Amino acid sequence: MLDELEFNTLTLDQHGDLAVLTLNRPQVFNALNGETLMELVDAVEAIAEEPEIAALIITGAGDKAFAAGADIRELSRIENVYGGREQALAGQNVMHEIASLPFPTIAAINGYALGGGLELALACDVRVAASSAKMGLPEVSLGIIPGYGGTQRLSRLIGPGRALDMILTGRQVDAQEALQMGLVNYVADITQHSALEKAREVAEQMTRNAPIALSLAKEAVRRGLSSSLEDGLEIEADLFGLLTSTQDFREGVTAFVEKRGAKFRGE
């Protein structure tokens, strides 16, 4: 069970088929230091190997921050170009591990998500923000640029114009502006839900669906983003055809014809 794993900067809990990974350095607004990055890789690999898991939520401890960026004290110790490149690649590797998971991933943004923290949220499939959340990529104010995938994922998500506005000004956006620009998918009404509670609802809605279809839907979108429309449509057709050979497909269409709920995952 994932609950049995121990980390210094994270907590990892399993609730049935849902894993909840919490950044647990609230005293420094859950900043991403080197230890946290390494533990994130270990945690994500453990989650990927757990056959019961159907979705992952990532959030931050406390109500102040999801993650307020990389650890600036560690960044200040970078001595040369090579050290800077290695730092960026280490962060990108973490985000790649998360983005490559075959099941839905949701960021529950419960406060500030800045710099590397926003890049962590961008690596997830869906983002749920608390109404009080603030998001931004302020790296240019430190003389650097987003290095954990922010220049690439943000521009693909909200378009280059909006992405460059956020990156070049370094400004923070609130939850409602983030929703309007497509940076987040949901804003949790604080009177009804926390970001984590809303993320759980979204995860449950997703995981009621066929697991292989969820995985290949992610693959179709991911591969299509780096392809032409024509090639992307070929990818979609290939994966669609593959899914029609699965037991999940048979169960899904049979349940629809029989006017009952589909029973996926051996339910």
Image (cartoon, rainbow, N blue to C red):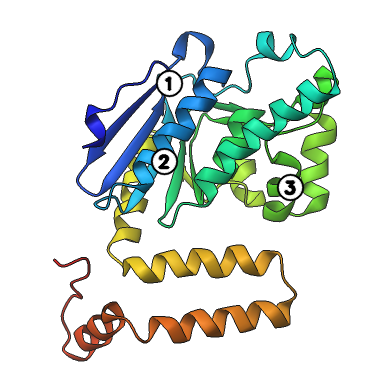
Q: Is residue 205 above or below residue 60?
A: below
Residue at image location 35% in from the left, 86% down from the top: 245
C-alpha gap between disc 1 and disc 3: 28 Å
User: Mark 2 falls on what kind of element?
Assistant: helix
Horizontal and vertical percent position of residue 7 = 36, 20
Judged by depth in the image, the label closer to the viewer, 2 or 1, is 2
Q: Which mark is residue 45?
A: 2
Dot 2 alpha-carbon crowd within 10 angstroms: few under 14, some 14 to 19, many 20 or more: some
Q: Which residue is mark 3?
A: 152
C-alpha gap between disc 2 and disc 3: 23 Å
The amino acid on which the numbered mark 2 sits, given as a three-letter code, is Glu
Q: Which residue is mark 1?
A: 63
Q: Earlier in the sequence, mark 1 or mark 3?
A: 1
In this view, the residue in front, 185 or 121, is 121
Q: Is residue 61 above or below residue 236?
A: above
The amino acid on which the numbered mark 1 sits, given as a three-letter code, is Asp
